[in-house]
Amino acid sequence: MRKIWIIILPVFFLFSCRKDHVQLPPPPVPYGIPITVTLNQNQPGYMVPSSFEGLSFETKILAANPGFLNVNNPALVQMIKNLGPGVLRIGGGTSDEVYWSDNPRGANTSSDSLTSTDIDRLAAFSTAIGWPVLFGLNLGSNDIVAAANEAVYVRNSLGSNLYAFQSGNEPDVFFFGMRPRTYTFSNYEGEWETYLSAVKTRIPDATFAGPDVAYNTDWITAFADAEHNNVKLLDAHYYLTGPATSPYINYQTILAYSEKLTGLLNIIKAQSEKYNLPYRVSESNNVYGGGKPGVSDVFASALWALDVMWTIAENNGNGINFHMGDGLFYSPISIRDGVLQANPEYYAMLAFKYASTGGKIIQASISNSEFYSAYACVKTDNSYVLTLINKDEKNNSSFTIMLNKTASGIQIQRLTAPAVTAATGITFAGSTVNTDGSFEVKTTEQYSINGNSVVVKMPAGSAAIVTIR
């Protein structure tokens, strides 16, 4: 009997070890930092406006670079059309510096003059891209007659493509040189109302927006209280940081959490709701002063821009206009070596368009918001689309999405780059913008699921658009 046990026991232990090895494989290696997103599918909120996205240009570009905003620039026309409906804003600091001329542009006309030729070219361009124009009148000169004449020509040329007029760009900083140091909101209000009256006398149905301030939120409140019956839109500017010459600003600056935008939105949203007026961030970008190389023109700016767009949308904003132009490092679109190219922020705008079109905001709560963001909306086909952002440049992450309802499948379109500091090699849904301006989605990950949770792996420094059905 002892001999039998001597034979059986080694065999038993041998097969026991083999069985344990098969049944207990090593646990899977976690994919980075775990993040939990809880989606409330039962309480849809604000509708994302179809024309949410926009671009902002200095007025002077119409005179100084007539070939840019031009129907004969088909690649630019196509790149803007890729973004869907939007709003084109003409203004910036030069709107208060260029002077209106009632004559067509001639060979000797200065680029400091804005002519009927420039406006007609703008009108044709706005028709080609299908975007209405938010147009800034020159308040800097305080020439009421010239402003009224300019408004009449702009209205006649653009027709239904004129969204609204603005009077004065960043008037809250006029005291830096355009006006006396004692210049106050009361002074601005008086000048603004004089312009309003002069334009309305010539164009009774003209519409206005304002106050288009740089930073002073007190002016937003005062303007809304005084002029809410005279405007169709409240607007203000937002730049995360600056100036671009600061040695302390780097790409990590724009990846870090900031409460600056929240402060602006709290004020302008309150006035928007108080007077039932939409609001828009009519000029925005990351580093004021033209942007900073290595910061404003790298992939970090795309993650920043995508986050900003969704933050405004969640706060019931009407939209945002990213400022751009010649020699500005933060431009979503620019010319390099004579070729038009899409820059990082443009790819963020594409991602937002694919995520938000036809969507109604729903609440997405996230367990860690320091370097991670999650936004969600429900589409008319009852699919749910999430935008997930991992701004951590070092750590991968796993986003676990908790649902109220059982899902059957997901698809993922990723916004990626070789690194957050990369200026090239950026793709959305596996595709880049072609030299003719066209864009087509190429790569979409698809998975079948059956449950109330979804796990999405997010590489460091990337974003993804996740559609859940």
Image (tube, helix red, strand yellow):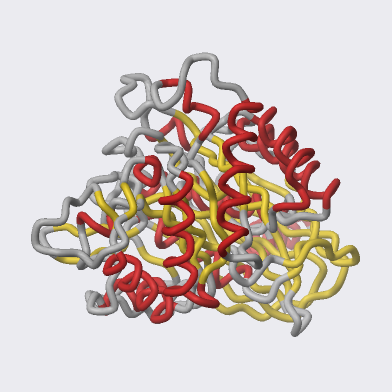
The residue sitting at the right extreme is: 42
> How many badges with numbers are in the image?
0
Q: Is residue 194 left or right of residue 266?
A: left
The residue sitting at the top extreme is: 182
Q: Is residue 367 above or below residue 203?
A: above
Residue 71 visible in the snapshot: yes
Residue 31 visible in the snapshot: no
Q: Is residue 266 left or right of residue 374?
A: right
Q: Position of residue 350 (x, y in %)?
A: 47, 67
Quadrant into which the N terminus falls: bottom right
Taking depth in this image into account, of 85 and 461 the one nearest to the observer is 85
Q: Quadrant of residue 452?
A: bottom right
> In the image, what residue occupies the spot 34% across and 53% down?
100
Quadrant into which the C terminus falls: bottom right
Q: Is residue 178 left or right of residue 376?
A: left
The residue sitting at the bottom extreme is: 381
Q: Position of residue 214 (x, y in %)?
A: 53, 34
> In the image, what residue occupies the spot 39% across and 22% down?
177
Q: Is residue 211 above or below residue 29?
A: above
Taking depth in this image into account, of 153 and 464 the one nearest to the observer is 153
Q: Is residue 270 above or below residue 136?
A: above
Taking depth in this image into account, of 374 and 69 the one nearest to the observer is 69
Q: Position of residue 327 (x, y in %)?
A: 23, 46
Taking depth in this image into account, of 361 and 239 the one nearest to the observer is 239
Q: Quadrant of residue 19?
A: bottom right
Q: Is residue 219 left or right of residue 101?
A: right
> In the image, what residue occupies the spot 58% across and 53% down?
309
Q: Position of residue 264 (x, y in %)?
A: 66, 36
> In the image, what residue occupies the spot 50% across and 36% down?
170
